Image (cartoon, rainbow, N blue to C red):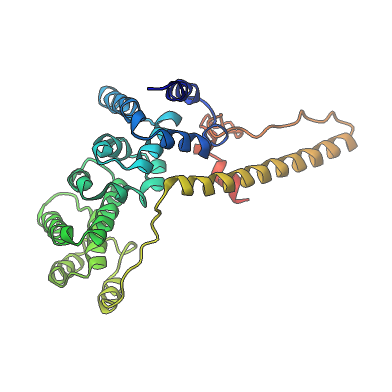
Amino acid sequence: MNQTQDDLLSTLDQLADADWDTVVTPKQIEALVTQGEALVPALLERIIDEALRARNDGELLLDNIAYLIIFALCELAIPETAEPVFHACFEGEDHDILEWLDNVLWKFGPSAVPILERVVCNDALDWYARAVALEVLEQIARDTPETREAHKAFLIKQLTEHLDRGGEPENDHIASLISDLTNLRDPEARPLIARAFAENRVDRSFITEENVEDSYKDSGHVRVSDRSTSILEDYRAWHQQNKLEMQEIEARRVREALKESQRMIFQGRPAPPPSKKPGRNDPCWCGSGKKYKKCHLEADQKR
């Protein structure tokens, strides 16, 4: 490992508690990707440590470093790294990371299929994590025709098992399975799909009988995916947009503080000290005790 790689790795630990959107820049992800396979063993060691901590503590909380490493490994998409990357993404049920990766994990290709199928079959995971795994499986099946029939068989088997089993119905997961079968327009699956609706086992806010019919009628149309080909490009676009939004939030905060100062001075009271926008990982300004990103960040961005 050369000096540049050593320096790059030595800076990672400094990012753990830093503010994500101001510290983790596209250049940092690009630097990890540029070093390529030489850095993979060190990056994997960090991800595996996160997975071990999850098993020891019962909860996987990804920090800035883990996000940065996962982004870099997904950009490289080396098949041998799929297992630890997918474990960190799915087992922790971190919706933030899954929202980033649901359109890029397909790059790992058919070698990732067994890992993704284990995620789908894991009833202990929540609906969203399993739905993302199904979406990635569908993307891989569309790209590699030799896997398509096996994927259809997997979906049919999963749907049949869920309809036959007793206990609490998993209508949301069943809806995800039906959605994927519908996207593949498999005629053999239609009786099973009809059974699911007839037994009222489908979350109709997710997919309806009409959605299924429309999709099968449109079987001559090739569905075009809006998936990404580069998480680095996605992150560059997000980082720039987020920077502009944060600047607007800060400008609005300054304007509001100025108006309040002027009002209080007019009333003969001292002006309050100037406020500062909290970072994503700082305590929220509302006093809830939550981090800003988990509390008012989204609402502030929409104003």
Relative to 71, residue 5 above or below:
above
Residue 18 rendering spot, x and y as whole percentages = 53, 27
Quarter location, residue 141: bottom left
Query: Residue 201 versus residue 15: which sits nearer the camera?
Result: 15
Left or right: 19, with 163 as reference point? right
- Asked if residue 147 shows in the view, the reply is yes
Q: Residue at x 9, y 56 (%)?
A: 164
Looking at the image, which is closer to me, 60 or 241? 241
Q: Is residue 193 above or below residue 112?
A: below
Instruction: Work out which quarter of the rendered image holds the N terminus and state it.
Output: top left
**Residue at (34% x, 29% y) in the render:** 38
Q: Residue 92, located in which quarter of the rendered image?
A: top left
Quarter of the image for residue 66 reads top left
Residue 103: image location, x then y, percent: 37, 52
Q: Residue furthest front?
A: 2
280 vs 117, left or right, is right
Which residue is painted at 34% across and 63% down in the image?
A: 205
